[in-house]
Image: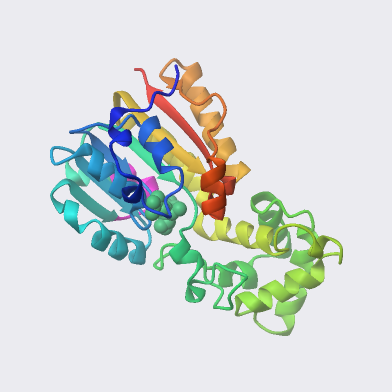
Amino acid sequence: MTLRPAGGIDDVPEERLGHISVMSREVGAALKLGKGMTVVDCTLGLGGHSLMMAEIIGVGGRLVGIDQDDRAIVLAKERLKGFSGRLDIVKSNFRNMNEVLDGLGVQAVDAVLFDLGVSSIQLDDPARGFSFRRDGPLDMRMDAGAQVSAFDVVNTFPEEELARVLWQYGEERFSRRIARNIVKARAASVINTTAELTAIILRSLPYKHSREGAHPATRSFQGIRIAVNQELESLESVLGVAFTRLKPAGRMCVISFHSLEDRIVKERFRSLSLAGSAAVLTKKPLRPSPEEESANPRSRSARLRALERIL
Ligand SMILES: C[S@@+](CC[C@H](N)C(=O)[O-])C[C@H]1O[C@@H](n2cnc3c(N)ncnc32)[C@H](O)[C@@H]1O
């Protein structure tokens, strides 16, 4: 099966696609959006993709937007207020998709979107503690009501567990050294801030490694963030659920930003396809255009996979 751009997305003017939404045109085409559809945006964020989807489904359509971040909910509500008649916005983890849809009386849907990871409003706000570029409290919770924050991971996880998080979720090759230095530092005094953590990471790395490529704290911060938000567990558990809510010929699209997420999506899509329940629409993941990559550096690592339900 090939990906055919749906008429719907081609009718949306460029400025309505939203500057920050990754691969919006490709999402619209992959989901084959059209008038009157019922669609779910599982990662509402700033509502950029939802804006595009709401426009295409029109007044007869229905859009459910989910996010676990209170601020995203407030901002998306504001941004999407022109579409309130066709829109339900729910604060929840997307792993609770069944409960959310049941609660709204929504049965089967035509399209589901996941645009994974953190949003720019989360990353750019020092108070959220996601970034090594700005000093802030060690937090990193997308859902402010969640039990475990980065502070807990950094200050209470046993050394072995810390090293596992950095290695498995951050793919950081110096995970053991960093974990050892974190444990040493916290024995002297509690580690409170992103700047303190960054300093420990920097002094754990060999000089050459810390001068090459991406910021040397990138991998460790990614690992801790994934652990705090249980990102891979949520993704693992929701893909099957999302599939079961699709109508026959309904479509699901996932944009991921690192290989750990992409592997989960690829394998789940493959097993649905092997079972004869779905057709994978993207043999290889779609990548952003060179123009999008240069206009929006965050898009550079994006990989989009899509499938269509058969049975
Ligand atoms: C990359 S942003 C989405 C941006 C959005 N597509 C747009 O166009 O503005 C990812 C959003 O997903 C949310 N998110 C990530 N994992 C989630 C989960 N398991 N449940 C609910 N929301 C989640 C984050 O809080 C964040 O707001």
Question: Looking at the figure, which quarter contains the C terminus?
Answer: top left
Where residue 31 sits, quadrant-wise, is top left
The percent position of residue 250, horizontal first and vertical second, equals 32, 27
In this rendering, position of residue 309 left or right of residue 268: left
Q: Is residue 25 visible?
A: yes
Taking the magenta stretch, the answer to whether it contains residue 113 is no
Which residue is more in the foreground, 53 or 122? 53
Number of on-image labels: 0
Examine the rendered structure and indicate whether residue 259 appears above or below residue 142.
Answer: above
Q: How is the image coloured?
A: rainbow
Q: Residue at x 17, y 41 (%)?
A: 105
Examine the rendered structure and indicate whether residue 147 appears above or below residue 84.
Answer: below
Which residue is more in the foreground, 308 or 146? 308
The percent position of residue 221, horizontal first and vertical second, equals 63, 62
Q: Which residues are magenta?
A: 91-99
Please, which residue is most extreme toward the bottom here? 189
Examine the rendered structure and indicate whether residue 255 appears above or below residue 204.
Answer: above
Which residue is more in the foreground, 18 or 101? 18
